[in-house]
Image (cartoon, rainbow, N blue to C red):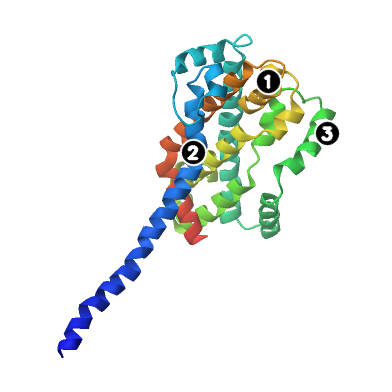
Amino acid sequence: MTSHTTNTPSTSVRIKRKFGAAPVAVNIVLLVATGYFLLPVFWLVVAATKSRPDLVSSFGFWFLRPQLFQNLQELFSEQDHVFGQWMLNSLLYSGVGALVGTVLAACAGYCLAVYRFRGKEAIFSLILGSVLVPATALALPTFLAFAKVGLTDSYLAVLLPSIISPFGVYLSRIYTQAAVPLELLEAGRIDGANEWQIFRAVVLRLISPALVTVFLFQFVGIWNNFFLPLIMLQNDRLFPVTLGLYSWQSQISRNPQLLLLTVVGSLVAVVPLVITFLSLQRYWKAGLTTGSVKG
């Protein structure tokens, strides 16, 4: 009896140690993964504050004589303020492209979720299949088609292909099926509302979390798009910021001062993405969760 009462606490301690080690290991793995992903960002922040000699000669992961504001002034004054033009172009391509793409995805997803027509499932399967096609594979055929109608080297050459969002159509459909009761639509029709009024006043409000998610993904995708502007544009005043920084990076061997401007420009280029994520995170998290559970 005495032996039994003596062993019980030690067994309990061993069990607690066994299962208590798991969260510690998980936390360590998560901490290492977080550091791995944040380390390049930290290097970028540190490097953007340095002078050109310090950038190549000092330790890369710590500050040395910071001069961020001077670097920003040089960045925005280089080549007749072309970097500001690149940022505005990226905001135009990403903002307008994501907004129009989200509206089109909402309309298409709503139609596929609510209405019955011949070939609906075949169309949806085709849309799902197009999600798997890499955008780079479509860039060259898109360029040839735009060249036929004379739209290359223009804002429309980047903007028009960017409004297509198969993933947005997919998410809009499954979210509409989960969040919009058909009885509510019938009640609207009985009250005399037409289809457009029902969609605008009722459906858009109910599926707004999914639409924010679609907008966010579309915005980030267009902002980071590189290959399509590369083959479509020749005029550097039409470049998005990604292509503009690449053009500077390719000239570093001839003009070494562009190395620092490229680093500072890369830091400035991620600021709109961070602001967009932080301002919309409470909406897109809800959209992703509902779609994954009820789709």
Q: Three-letter amino acid code at disc 2? A: Leu
Label 1 packing within 10 angstroms: few (<14), some (14-19), many (20+): some
First along the sequence among labels 3 and 2? 2
Label 2 packing within 10 angstroms: few (<14), some (14-19), many (20+): few
Residue 23, position as x, y percentages in the image: 36, 61
Q: Which residue is mark 3?
A: 144
**Residue at the location (48% across, 31% down)?**
61
1 and 2 marks in contact (CB < 8 Å): no
Residue 42, position as x, y percentages in the image: 47, 33
- Along the horizontal axis of the image, is 22 left or right of 269? left
Question: Which corner quadrant of the image does residue 232 belong to?
Answer: top right
Q: Which residue is mark 2?
A: 39
Marks 3/2: CA–CA distance: 41 Å
Marks 1/2: CA–CA distance: 24 Å
- Along the horizontal axis of the image, is 288 left or right of 13? right
Q: Secondary structure at mark 1?
A: loop
Q: Which residue is mark 1?
A: 252
Residue 144 against residue 124 in the figure, above or below? above
Q: Nearer the viewer, mark 3 or mark 2?
A: 2
Q: Secondary structure at mark 3?
A: helix
First along the sequence among labels 3 and 1? 3
Residue 143 against residue 77 in the figure, above or below? below
**Residue at the location (22% across, 82% down)?**
7
Return the residue nearer the eye: 283 or 71: 71
**Residue at the location (40% across, 43% down)?**
282
Q: Nearer the viewer, mark 3 or mark 1?
A: 1
Q: Three-letter amino acid code at disc 3? A: Leu
Image quadrant where one finds the N terminus: bottom left
Residue 292 against residue 14 in the figure, above or below? above
Return the residue nearer the eye: 41 or 60: 60
Q: Secondary structure at mark 2?
A: helix
